[in-house]
Image (cartoon, rainbow, N blue to C red):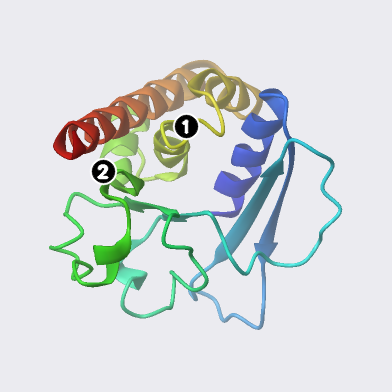
Amino acid sequence: MVTGAEMLSIAAFLGGRHAQAFPSFGSERTGAPVVAFCRMDDREIRLREPIMQPDAIIIQDATLLHQVDVFSGLKKDGYILINTTQTFEQLGLGEFVKGFQSDHLLTVPASELAIKHVRRPVPNVPLLGAFAALGSLISLQAVHAAIAQKFKGAVAQGNQAAATEAYDIVMEQERKAAAHHA
């Protein structure tokens, strides 16, 4: 998650925004859930404190959904992106997400995409591709550029392919949600 937040801030910066990424380290024991934040703005960012009311939440490990209050402070018009092959109902979140906009509730099989394209279950890059499809805060091109800065050769190409496939999956979910509303 720390690397994912860092790459998200790089993609935002490459897309012309101001950005900062920072992990949240408390007195966590080894193996405890890790939280990382990314703040983006069109203006210079002077804040340094943790984000208490996020506009979007990316959940890399769906097993934490019922162990940790991952949705703390999220606004009802916020976005939720979860690395899973299940639906929100199958995850036991059907009641919780009733007040949210359906096109803001997205899932992507990021671990599976990473295994397919990079041969390792590292979901952060596919999640960045999926996030690029949400609300247009960062572009897929900026995600590809951030990947090219972080990785080289076949690893970069595999990550770019995983990000692109995740982006396409989310765009398709958003199209279906929009058609459902129409």
Binning the other alpha carbons within 10 Å of mark 2 as few (below 14), some (14 to 19) or many (20 upward) gives some
Residue 2 in the image: state x and y as whole percent. 60, 54
Check disc 1 and report its element: helix, strand or loop.
helix
> Are there few (<14), some (14-19), or many (20+) residues within 10 Å of tag 1?
many
Q: Examine the rendered structure and indicate whether residue 19 appears above or below residue 15.
A: below
Q: Quadrant of residue 61?
A: bottom left
Looking at the picture, does residue 178 appear above or below residue 156?
A: below
Q: Residue at x 81, y 61 (%)?
A: 48
The residue drawn where x is 54% and y is 76% is 30
- Amino acid of disc 1: Ala
Label at residue 132:
1
The percent position of residue 35, horizontal first and vertical second, equals: 56, 65
Looking at marks 1 and 2 on the same chain, the residue that comes earlier in the sequence is marked by 2
Q: What type is the residue that disc 2 sits on?
A: Pro
- Residue 138: image x %, image y %? 56, 30
Q: Which residue is mark 2?
A: 109
Q: Residue 157: x and y, percent? A: 45, 18
